[in-house]
């Protein structure tokens, strides 16, 4: 049997995998126990191990990050309008539509590319119930200012922390902020279980509710307390997660070296702007975005094509903006006049390849192509 494989070239990311032989003993345990899902031993172990690794009190594992987002909104019974960013992966806003919630887009801060705290208050209406910011590219949001606004107006805060695995600020994990934070362990993310996700929850009661919601609302054999969904992570993914955790620190360390190599290589290239990573104490180097400004020799799209012609498959994350997709663009807050910074950044951004096994020569090749 032959399966299709990805064509040659350097992609924005390549999934981080442990040596296959090391996974076999885990699979044998699953085959022996015949416990495949429904909160089995690997699920329990992995929840515990992740809490310890991330430095958080509690979390609930999920099949993927999107179901974690959808369930987080259900868990807190969020309704009406939610303030969010247009500069993210489309799942952020989709999770609101899946809950019958109206997204209200607020512009980003051009320095951090995160929701601009100065613009949040003007978007609050009597229907607003929550704020859903994204720690874009793993750089922490203005968490204190967002919390102050939320407290003043009685709003909940749910962080889409899909990019922020392992990121820390001065006080510890960024995942401790807000009412809930969600993670994604998709193949393309810093830490992957093929597919997977989690909700970080501060209190025991909310964790219980989330655990019920991800299992159809079952509390026991005969009791269903809520219209839950099937969001449970399988034993296969949880076992893989246990193994992946062993390699994650080394993988992030390798990313850090690549990040530094790009920064050094591109530091004096006119018209190429790089984000600073001073906002976090511990970074995860999940992405390497550059902004291609008008004083660069080529347009953003011309550079993007030049890279492609040389086998470098970078990505224009996040272009188009979420607010430009057909199911959102009719909203009053989706107008580009309301989102000038996000609109500009979406026109300028390219995310360069970054993954632990990316060889130095290939980083240098990308740098040289950009330097022209
Ligand atoms: C990847 C991602 C998601 C969705 O996670 P999945 O695990 O792929 O469902 C949500 N939000 C952001 C910002 C993401 O990057």
Image (cartoon, grey):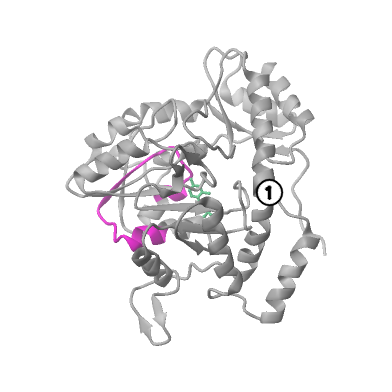
Q: Quadrant of residue 310?
A: top right
Q: Residue at x 29, y 30 (%)?
A: 118
Q: Residue at x 77, y 67 (%)?
A: 24
Is residue 77 inside the magenta stretch?
yes
Q: In this picture, is 254 found above or below 248?
A: above
Horizontal side of residue 209 vs 321, given as left or right: left
In the image, 221 versus 323, the foreground residue is 221
Q: Residues within 10 Å of mark 1 (few under 14, many from 20)?
A: some
- Asked if the beta carbon under badge 1 is closer than 8 A to the nearest atom of ligand 1, the reply is no
x, y (%) of residue 165?
54, 47
Q: Which residue is mark 1?
A: 15
- Look at the image and tell me in which quarter the N terminus lies: bottom right
x, y (%) of residue 128?
23, 48
Is residue 38 inside the magenta stretch?
no
Q: Quadrant of residue 213?
A: bottom left
In the image, 72 versus 9, the foreground residue is 72
Q: Residue at x 68, y 40 (%)?
A: 355
Please tell me whether mark 1 sits on a helix, a strand or a loop. loop
- Look at the image and tell me in which quarter the C terminus lies: top right
Q: Residue at x 64, y 55 (%)?
A: 245
x, y (%) of residue 15?
68, 49
Magenta region, residue range: 70-93
């Amino acid at each position: 049997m032959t399966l299709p494989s990805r064509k040659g070239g350097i992609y924005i990311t390549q999934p981080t995998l442990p040596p296959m032989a090391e996974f076999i003993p885990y699979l044998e345990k699953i085959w022996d126990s015949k416990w495949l899902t429904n909160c089995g031993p690997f699920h329990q172990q992995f929840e515990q191990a992740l809490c310890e690794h991330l430095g958080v009190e509690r979390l609930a594992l999920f099949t993927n990050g999107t179901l974690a987002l959808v369930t987080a909104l259900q868990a807190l019974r969020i309704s009406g309008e939610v303030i969010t960013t247009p500069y993210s992966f489309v799942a952020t806003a989709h999770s609101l539509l899946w809950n019958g919630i109206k997204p209200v887009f607020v512009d980003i801060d051009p320095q951090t590319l995160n929701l601009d705290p100065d613009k949040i208050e003007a978007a609050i209406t009597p229907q607003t119930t929550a704020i859903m910011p994204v720690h874009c590219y793993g750089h922490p949001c203005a968490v204190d200012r967002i919390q102050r606004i939320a407290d003043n107006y009685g709003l909940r805060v749910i962080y889409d922390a899909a990019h922020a695995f392992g990121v820390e600020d001065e006080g510890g994990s960024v995942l401790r902020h807000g009412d809930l934070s969600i993670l994604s362990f998709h193949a393309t993310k810093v830490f992957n279980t093929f597919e997977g996700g989690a909700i970080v929850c501060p209190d025991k009661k909310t964790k219980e509710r989330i655990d019920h919601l991800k299992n159809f609302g079952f509390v026991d054999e005969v009791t269903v307390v809520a219209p839950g969904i099937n969001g449970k992570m399988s034993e296969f993914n949880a076992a893989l997660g246990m193994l992946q955790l062993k390699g994650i620190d080394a993988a992030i360390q390798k990313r850090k070296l690549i990040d530094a190599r790009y920064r050094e290589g591109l530091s004096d290239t006119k018209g190429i702007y790089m984000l600073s990573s001073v906002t976090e104490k511990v970074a995860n180097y999940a992405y390497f975005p550059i902004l291609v400004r008008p004083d660069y020799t080529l347009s953003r799209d011309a550079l993007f094509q030049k890279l492609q012609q040389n086998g470098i498959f970078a990505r224009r994350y996040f272009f188009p903006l979420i607010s430009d997709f057909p199911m959102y663009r009719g909203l009053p807050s989706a107008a580009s006049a309301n989102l000038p910074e996000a609109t500009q950044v979406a026109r300028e951004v390219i995310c360069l390849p970054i993954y632990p096994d990316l060889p130095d020569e290939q980083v240098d090749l990308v740098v040289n192509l950009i330097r022209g």
